[in-house]
Image: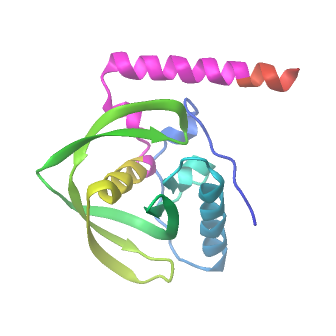
Amino acid sequence: MSRLSIITAPDSRLTIKSANVDQIDDKLRKFMTSMSNTLKFSSNGVGLAAPQVGINKRVVIINSFQDGERGETQFFVNPKILHFSEETVISEEGCLSVPGYCAEVQRAKSIRLSYLDYDNNQQETFFTGFFSICLQHEINHLDGILFIDHLSSTKKNIAVRKLKKLKKLSNAANII
């Protein structure tokens, strides 16, 4: 059971726009399974995008929750949002690549999404509520956008300073 290392901000690799996947083959499925294992072992992660583990491909996974228990992992390859609802919601978001920081972000309440599933089938599905928010968050990663990029410059600067401090402390602990 392979687990991947999660890249944390302010790493510049998180700002690169990801390339489309040409083909869903056994190699990509193995990678997506490793992403799923990585997400399952994270303490509070709901979704994960390939750039967060250093792969610049348009792959997203979401782990649904039911009654507080992890559910089935859903796979989205080359996801494209076809429609955003006009109605928006504000919800608190966190991110595995921005550890220890949460903030309120405004997003569309629902979306219509086109994507390839794990078995290479073309899908077009309507998502609403929490699942819609998670997908928008993860698809932003594919475009090099972090949730803190949706914040005011003041709040974003606070988050970045906190992340740099955590990285510095982590690096110092690794030296000792």
* Up/down of 113 relative to 3, above or below: below
Which SS type dominates the magenta stretch?
helix
The image shows residue 60 at horizontal and vertical percentages of 48, 60
Q: Is residue 42 above or below residue 160?
A: below
Residue 137 position within the rendered picture, expressed as x and y whole percent measured from the top left: 38, 48
Q: Is residue 2 visible?
A: yes
Q: Position of residue 11 (x, y in %)?
A: 58, 33
Q: Is residue 163 magenta?
A: yes
Give the quarter of the figure containing the C terminus: top right
Residue ranking furthest to the left: 86
Where, by quadrant of the figure, is residue 124 drawn?
A: bottom left
In the image, what residue occupies the spot 59% across and 56% down?
39
Q: Residue at x 39, y 38 (%)?
A: 147
Q: Which residues are magenta?
A: 141-169
With 131 as the anchor, is 162 left or right in this view? right
Can you tell which quarter of the image residue 102 is in? top left
Q: Quadrant of the N terminus?
A: bottom right
Q: Nearer the viewer, residue 17 or 32?
A: 32
Q: Residue at x 61, y 61 (%)?
A: 35
- The structure residue drawn at horizontal position 80% and vertical position 22%, both measured from the top left corner, is 173
Q: Describe residue 147's horizontal placement relative to residue 58 as left or right.
A: left
Q: Nearer the viewer, residue 53 or 128?
A: 128
